[in-house]
Image (tube, grey):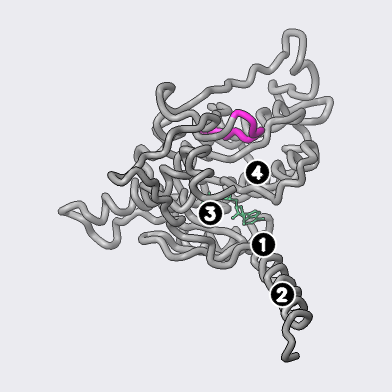
């Protein structure tokens, strides 16, 4: 798909370039904030799976830059934003970057070190594995990323803090809801307007972190497994009857973003300049080392090789 054609079909892709966001995902976090006010009172944040960095840009613009530009700003009081991804990303003002795998315990240790004994007010996770198209498989791998996020949350989030995580809706959505409910008093699944209807993606908005009494981080996985077992956990029996009967679990599901705002599944006419043409903008910051770079390089080398062979066969001087 050409850039102009994508600009027409994907209004949020075009708007992201116009407003200086590295990815259209920025609008998802902004629309979640419109509904849930997630940045209120937030001074320390962890952005998990952050590359290419549009959520970190939102955090920088909403939290760091206003604090830095405030007349009474002091260096020591500026918000702390730590962003992690497998991929490196170009710098963002006020954002500390860690390159690492969130499923690896050592990554959590590095993040904790940056907080220097303090706790985070908010953890966001927009992690996504490479999607295979096999929904069960994609949902399973996605849930592993959320659980890795939850592991970091249990080490670093303050009581009362918030956790926002991308989920893939599927047959285990109720189980995930119950697992998250063990740790947060409010859990809502939200679908921002900038997330396409055709996508199974949604976001778990978890508010008021309150781990079970006596909870030890080492017990996380045992506790989560218990949610899916016949005995359940305390009064939250999610193992049976979530689809029927008196124990049925109702998952709060909310569309968010201005309902009169742009619809991500609709095409919009392109704004023309005075001479009647349309000028497509370049992406704000292409990924600096995307995982697909090697494949692109190999394809390029192959094409060059083929062109070289073609040249050989038509060049009479050879
Ligand atoms: N929120 C980002 C933004 O606004 O620019 C977009 C995130 S992108 C949809 C998903 C990211 O998850 C990718 O950059 C990928 O490298 C990262 N990711 C996937 N698995 C990961 C893992 N195990 N550890 C760290 N990052 C991971």
User: Relative to residue 75, is residue 245 drawn left or right?
Assistant: right
- Point out the tag, 2 or 3, that comes first from the N-terminus: 3
Q: Residue furthest top?
A: 246
User: Which residue is labeled 4 in the image?
Assistant: 146
Residue drawn at x 48%, y 55% as measured from the top left: 53
- Judge whether 117 appears above or below 191 on screen: below
Q: CB under 8 Å between callouts 1 and 4? A: no
Q: CB under 8 Å between callouts 1 and 2? A: no
Secondary structure at numbered mark 4: helix
Which callout, 4 or 2, points to the residue nearer the camera? 2
Q: CA distance from mark 1 to mark 3?
A: 17 Å
Q: Residue furthest left?
A: 71
User: Which residue is labeled 3 in the image?
Assistant: 50
Q: CA distance from mark 1 to mark 4?
A: 23 Å
Q: Which mark is residue 140?
A: none
Q: CA distance from mark 2 to mark 3?
A: 38 Å
**Depth order, front residue of 75/271:** 271
Q: Is mark 3 within 8 Å of ligand 1?
A: yes
Magenta range is 197-208
Could you tell me residue 143's position as x and y percent?
A: 71, 41
Could you tell me residue 228's position as x and y percent?
A: 79, 31
Please identify the quarter of the rendering in which residue 185 is found. top right
Which callout, 4 or 3, points to the residue nearer the camera? 3
Secondary structure at numbered mark 3: loop
Q: CA distance from mark 4 to mark 2?
A: 46 Å
- Point out the tag, 1 or 2, that comes first from the N-terminus: 1
Q: Is residue 59 magenta?
A: no
Q: Which mark is residue 307?
A: 2
Q: Is residue 201 magenta?
A: yes
Secondary structure at numbered mark 1: loop
Secondary structure at numbered mark 2: helix
Residue drawn at x 45%, y 50% as measured from the top left: 45
């Amino acid at each position: 798909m050409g850039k102009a054609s994508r600009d027409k079909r994907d209004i949020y892709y075009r708007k992201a370039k116009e407003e200086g966001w590295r990815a259209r995902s920025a609008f998802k976090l902004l629309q979640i904030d419109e509904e849930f006010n997630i940045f209120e009172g937030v001074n320390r944040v962890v952005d998990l799976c952050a590359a290419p960095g549009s959520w970190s840009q939102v955090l920088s613009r909403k939290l760091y830059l206003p604090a830095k530009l405030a007349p009474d700003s002091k260096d020591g009081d500026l918000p702390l934003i730590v962003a992690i991804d497998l991929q490196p990303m170009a710098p963002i003002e006020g954002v500390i970057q860690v390159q690492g795998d969130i499923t690896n315990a050592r990554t959590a240790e590095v993040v904790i070190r940056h907080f220097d004994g303090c706790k985070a007010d908010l953890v966001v996770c927009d992690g996504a594995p490479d999607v295979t198209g096999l929904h069960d498989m994609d949902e399973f791998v996605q849930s592993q990323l959320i659980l890795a996020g939850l592991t970091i949350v249990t080490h670093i989030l303050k009581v009362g803090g918030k956790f926002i995580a991308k989920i893939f809706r599927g047959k285990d959505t109720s189980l995930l809801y119950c697992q998250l409910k063990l740790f947060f008093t409010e859990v809502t699944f939200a679908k921002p307007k900038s997330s396409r209807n055709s996508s199974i993606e949604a976001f778990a908005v978890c508010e008021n972190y309150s781990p079970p009494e006596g909870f030890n981080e080492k017990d996380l996985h045992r506790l989560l497994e218990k949610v899916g077992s016949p005995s359940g956990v305390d009064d939250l029996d999610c193992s049976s009857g979530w689809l029927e009967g008196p124990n049925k679990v109702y998952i709060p599901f909310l569309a968010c973003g201005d309902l009169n705002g742009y619809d991500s599944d609709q095409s919009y006419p392109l704004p023309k300049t005075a001479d009647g043409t349309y000028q497509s903008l370049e992406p704000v910051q292409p990924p600096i080392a995307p995982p697909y770079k090697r494949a692109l390089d190999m394809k390029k080398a192959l094409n060059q090789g083929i062109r070289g062979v073609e040249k050989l066969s038509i060049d009479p001087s050879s």
